[in-house]
Image (cartoon, rainbow, N blue to C red):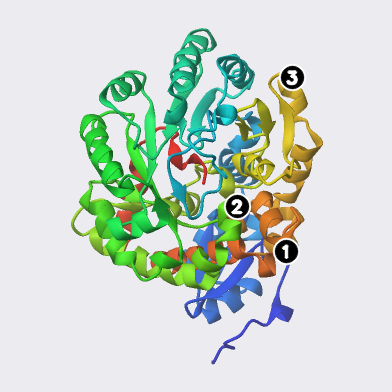
């Protein structure tokens, strides 16, 4: 008997079928639920599933029953524990604390999100007094783990404050006893052996930017009077050589601009060549200077997803020779293949701005997230939630802006997201929605990040359906690392 090739929703037997969402992908139906479970079904299997006519003695029925897709076979206690484990971040305070030691920078990147200032402008340096208050405020968070991340500008421009904060944070933690990780996001050009020795001794993780081969990197990341690519690669190799067997290490971040779209192979080869563990394929975001240069450097969601698919398949080929991961895939695959959420703040629901992360500007201003802090440079203080010079921790995390952001980033409040098959694995950034669409409550059908995340997950589920790469994916997920530069975008 022939089966219909399209969905006949009138056959749905709600008394037998548990809650699910679905998406047509690769000629099959992908079904998912809020516990993160998923399954591919043929047309015939899907019709039998929704009509409650699956063979109850079959393996497919058993799998769907154990995964919570069969209404009268749901183990609510077990499934509730799964949901709690996947959403454990809801019971923690801010764990990521972004500190802007200075807005000065010796680079003039085409996509600079921070709107950095010239090297001679010391008015945007954090003072030691403010630095002390910032660290004191950070340790008011009830989170058992703290990640302190230096951003900028270029943090090493204000070395005395960076050095002080590292020392004072360790001093505070001797009493607090938290899991403390310190990350330095730097272009590496101002690093020297003395600074490196101190940072390594203090267990600081490094994160730098590497946009590909020298011509591409230097085109994106202008360094007047210097060679950005040469400095980055030189110090990356030095730090990698000294830390590859230790828990603190160096990683690099890629920003994909229009100039990158045809260079996916060159970019991956560059990362492999310097000994990187992996690459984070991230599109340029519409913040800071990138808003002004978007027509020159920006790319459409479709262009980025096409770039991603080609680069990802090449990465899979590289894994025949050596382990090498793609970080967006690791984040999504962790949610798809395990019950662990890696707590990447831009891809969780709610997003965590103000309750998962907090940003501290050079003047002590407190912002719901680093992207919110970037808006202050454009004269928009919508996401400022206090100051370390006044008020208290509870005033900031309870600020009305934080509440609004969390409501806007809850996917159940988004019409399109609430019914999307990828809801269990995805997240929305209200600040990005605000930058692109003028409203923290984004309009998903035309939202670029939504289209990019959906495209990436299409690629991943298609590879999961093929079943040829499971060992590679499992190896990526088993790789241990501290909370580091990949905790946010």
The image position of residue 278, as x and y in percent, is: 32, 49
Q: Quadrant of the N terminus?
A: bottom right
- Picture coordinates of residue 307 (x, y %)? 41, 69
Label located before the other in sequence (2 or 1): 2
Secondary structure of the residue carrying tag 3 is: loop
Secondary structure state at the residue bearing disc 2:
loop
How many circles with numbers are drawn on the protein? Answer: 3
Alpha carbon distance from label 3 to label 1:
34 Å
Sequence-earlier tag: 3 or 1 = 3
Image marks 2 and 1: residues in contact by CB distance under 8 Å: no
Q: Could you say which quadrant of the image residue 481 lies in? A: top left
- The Cα–Cα distance between marks 2 and 1, rounded to whole angstroms, is 18 Å
In three-dimensional space, the C-alpha distance between marks 2 and 3, rounded to whole angstroms, equals 29 Å
Residue 418, image quadrant: bottom right
Would you say residue 211 is visible in this rendering? yes
Q: Find the residue positioned furthest to the left.
A: 321
Q: Which residue does the image show at 68% across and 30% down from the upper left?
A: 366
Residue denoted by label 1: 443
Q: Which residue is mark 3?
A: 392
Q: Nearer the viewer, mark 2 or mark 1?
A: 2
User: Which of the labelled discs sits on residue 287, or is there none?
Assistant: 2
For marks 2 and 3, the one nearer the N-term is 2
Percent position of residue 312, x then y:
36, 63
Q: Please tell me whether mark 1 sits on a helix, a strand or a loop.
A: loop
Farthest residue in the top direction?
A: 175
């Amino acid at each position: 008997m022939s089966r219909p090739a399209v969905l006949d929703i009138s056959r749905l037997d709600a008394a037998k079928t548990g809650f699910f969402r679905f998406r047509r992908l690769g000629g099959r139906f992908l079904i998912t639920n809020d516990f993160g479970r998923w399954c591919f079904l043929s047309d015939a299997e899907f019709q039998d599933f929704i009509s409650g006519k699956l063979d109850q003695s079959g393996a497919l029925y058993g799998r769907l029953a154990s995964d919570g897709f069969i209404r009268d076979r749901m183990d609510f206690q077990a499934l509730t524990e799964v949901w709690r484990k996947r959403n454990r971040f809801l019971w923690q305070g801010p764990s990521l604390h972004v500190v802007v030691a200075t807005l000065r920078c010796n680079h003039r990147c085409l996509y600079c999100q921070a709107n950095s200032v010239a090297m001679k402008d010391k008015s945007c340096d954090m003072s030691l007094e403010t630095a002390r208050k910032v660290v004191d405020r950070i340790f008011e968070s009830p989170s058992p783990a703290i990640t302190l991340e230096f951003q900028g500008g270029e943090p090493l421009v204000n070395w005395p404050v960076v050095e002080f904060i590292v020392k004072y944070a360790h001093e505070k933690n001797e009493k607090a006893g938290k899991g403390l990780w310190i990350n330095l996001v730097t272009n590496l050009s101002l690093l020297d052996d003395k600074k490196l020795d101190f940072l390594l001794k203090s267990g600081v993780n490094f994160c730098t930017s590497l946009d590909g081969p020298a011509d591409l990197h230097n085109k994106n990341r202008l360094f007047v009077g210097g060679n950005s690519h040469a400095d980055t690669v030189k110090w990356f190799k030095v730090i990698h050589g000294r830390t590859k067997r230790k828990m603190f290490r160096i990683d690099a971040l890629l920003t994909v601009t229009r100039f990158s779209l045809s260079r996916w192979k060159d970019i991956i080869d560059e990362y492999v060549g310097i000994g990187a563990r992996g690459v984070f394929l991230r599109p340029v975001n519409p913040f800071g200077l990138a808003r002004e240069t978007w027509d020159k450097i920006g790319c459409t969601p479709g262009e980025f997803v096409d770039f991603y698919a080609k680069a990802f398949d090449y990465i899979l080929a590289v894994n025949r020779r050596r382990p090498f991961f793609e970080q967006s895939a690791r984040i999504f695959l962790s949610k798809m293949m395990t019950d662990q959420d890696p707590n990447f703040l831009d891809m969780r629901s709610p997003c965590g701005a103000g309750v998962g992360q907090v940003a501290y500007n050079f003047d002590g201003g407190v912002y719901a997230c680093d992207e919110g802090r970037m808006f202050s440079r454009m004269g928009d203080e919508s996401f400022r939630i206090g100051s370390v010079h006044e008020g208290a921790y509870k005033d900031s995390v309870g600020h009305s802006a934080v509440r609004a952001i969390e409501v806007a980033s809850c996917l159940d409040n988004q019409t399109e997201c609430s019914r999307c098959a990828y809801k269990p694995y995805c997240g929305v950034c209200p600040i990005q929605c605000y930058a692109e669409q003028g409203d923290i409550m984004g309009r998903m059908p035309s939202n670029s990040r939504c289209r990019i995340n959906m495209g990436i997950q299409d690629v991943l589920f298609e590879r999961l359906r093929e079943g040829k790469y499971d060992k590679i994916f499992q190896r990526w997920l088993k790789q241990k690392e501290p909370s580091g530069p990949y905790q946010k975008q």
